[in-house]
Image (cartoon, coloured by chain):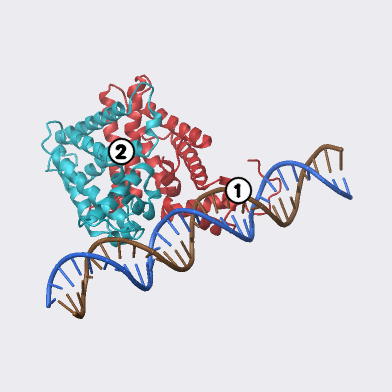
Chain colours: A cyan, B red, C brown, D blue
Amino acid sequence: MVPAPHDQHGDVRRLVLDAAIAIIESDGAESLSMREVARRAGVSHQAPYHYFGDRSGIFAAISEEGFSALAGAFRDVQESTISAAKAGFIAYLSFARNHVGHFRVMFRQDICGVTDNEGTATAAESAFNELLQMVARTIGSSVDPKAAHTFAFTMWSQAHGLATLVIDGPLPQKLLPGVSLDDQIDAVINLCSHMVALEAAEMGLVPSHS
Amino acid sequence: MVPAPHDQHGDVRRLVLDAAIAIIESDGAESLSMREVARRAGVSHQAPYHYFGDRSGIFAAISEEGFSALAGAFRDVQESTISAAKAGFIAYLSFARNHVGHFRVMFRQDICGVTDNEGTATAAESAFNELLQMVARTIGSSVDPKAAHTFAFTMWSQAHGLATLVIDGPLPQKLLPGVSLDDQIDAVINLCSHMVALEAAEMGLVPSHS
DNA sequence: AGTACAACTTGACATTGTCAAGTACAACGA
DNA sequence: TCGTTGTACTTGACAATGTCAAGTTGTACT
């Protein structure tokens, strides 16, 4: 196989990554094959190894890209006019549904540990920091860190659970007749946002409780 | 499916299933190998095919067993003295953490669709019905089905998100120093339960116990 | 010109999922 | 008693996979 004469530097890496993301998006992470990736990128079966070392290296790269994009998405809704919580839920769900390939890899320690790769770790760190700032905008920054952390984990769980149940889970098959998936997601996000707002209000009105 | 009248050998089907669950629990679903399963069960590499047809057949069987167990766990906390919501969260998390092998398969449409297998479908149906009943115990049964469904999806998302972030996600690496994973999970469950109770109260309904 | 290195390539190997075909043995009707 | 049928496996083979090893080619710098 003769390589194209004017291959740009870094072209292949991007081609391989995109092919991998496409495969994961359509068939799931477990059916990602190094050789199929190479085939779709139009390179030899060892070219991906040159850039990513091994199979988990591809997952690490996708994960890093995903966390960076997620952090960016959080940053983008920072000056949203709606509540910080609701904006965050919407951003999380929209990221997950628009980047299924990334999302399917990012939160799977079994196939790609957040700590395995340095770039992935810092990207994940930055996304988590954006989350904490979003929480601060929701419940105020005077709350003690422990409670803030618990609040962050709670909102994260809400958003993450909904996203995973929608993307890989059975939720779409449990819809009430006449309710579209989009509508149902909106309704859940509204309910979550409302519950978070109620809780935040109560935290602000009860000073000496904790 | 009729068991042999006199079965002096170990139940091969059970051995295979348990070996598979153990592998998934320790290494994740994608590293489940039919041949390794057979090896651990002490049978030939084709014996598992006799009982499960193919690789996804094993996943389907595990999924069915998991949903049955989850439905049972929901049923068991029905007469709990604590609030239905909190009991449900605790049951979900404890199921997930005590049956990691099952949990890793049950909600992954990409490796085992809920609708692929009839047994899996009815087991999942029954677990979902228990969820709906738990919601009814939380917000009352006079609420319209649409709102009840949204409430169910919301609580399900909360529990499921926390479970997945704990089991396969990066949550355990994001703990505040001095806070144990168990304590953090408890705190999130308490916050979720509290928010659900606030919402139920606002809907004009009396929480069953609190 | 020579050296070093990056960006690939071809080749080989053990392991995998699965199809095909065989074996052992119990139960049953004739 | 004999043959048939069915269950519960087994051995064998095959293409495909992840990955190690060892080229090959071009570009950059000394």
The residue lying toward the viewer, choosing from B186 and A116, is A116
Query: The N terminus of chain A appears in which quarter of the rendering?
Result: bottom left
Left or right: residue B127 compared with residue A77: right
Q: Amino acid at mark 2?
A: Ala
* Occupied quadrant, residue A91: top left
**Which residue position is annotated with label 1?**
B50
Q: Who's the residue at 22% across and 43% down the image?
A: A152
Q: Who's the residue at 28% across and 42% down the image?
A: B188
Left or right: residue A143 compared with residue A36: left
x, y (%) of residue B42? 58, 59
Q: Could you tell me if residue A75 is visible in this image?
A: yes
In this rendering, is residue B60 above or below C4?
above
Give yes or no for contact between labels 2 and 1 (Cβ–Cβ under 8 Å): no
x, y (%) of residue D12? 62, 60
Q: Could you tell me if residue A207 is visible in this image?
A: no
In this rendering, is residue B75 above or below B58?
above
Q: Amino acid at mark 1?
A: His
Chain of the residue on which disc 2 is drawn = A
Kindly indicate whether the residues beneath marks 2 and 1 are on one polypeptide chain. Answer: no
Chain of the residue on which disc 1 is drawn = B
**Which residue position is annotated with label 2?**
A163
The residue lying toward the viewer, choosing from B50 and B13, is B50
Q: Who's the residue at 34% across and 54% down the image?
A: A38
The residue lying toward the viewer, choosing from A210 and A40, is A40
**SS class of the residue under badge 1?**
helix
Left or right: residue B165 compared with residue B47: left
* Occupied quadrant, residue B77: top left
For the residues marked 2 and 1, what is the alpha-carbon distance in whole angstroms?
Answer: 36 Å
Query: The C terminus of chain A appears in which quarter of the rendering?
Result: top left
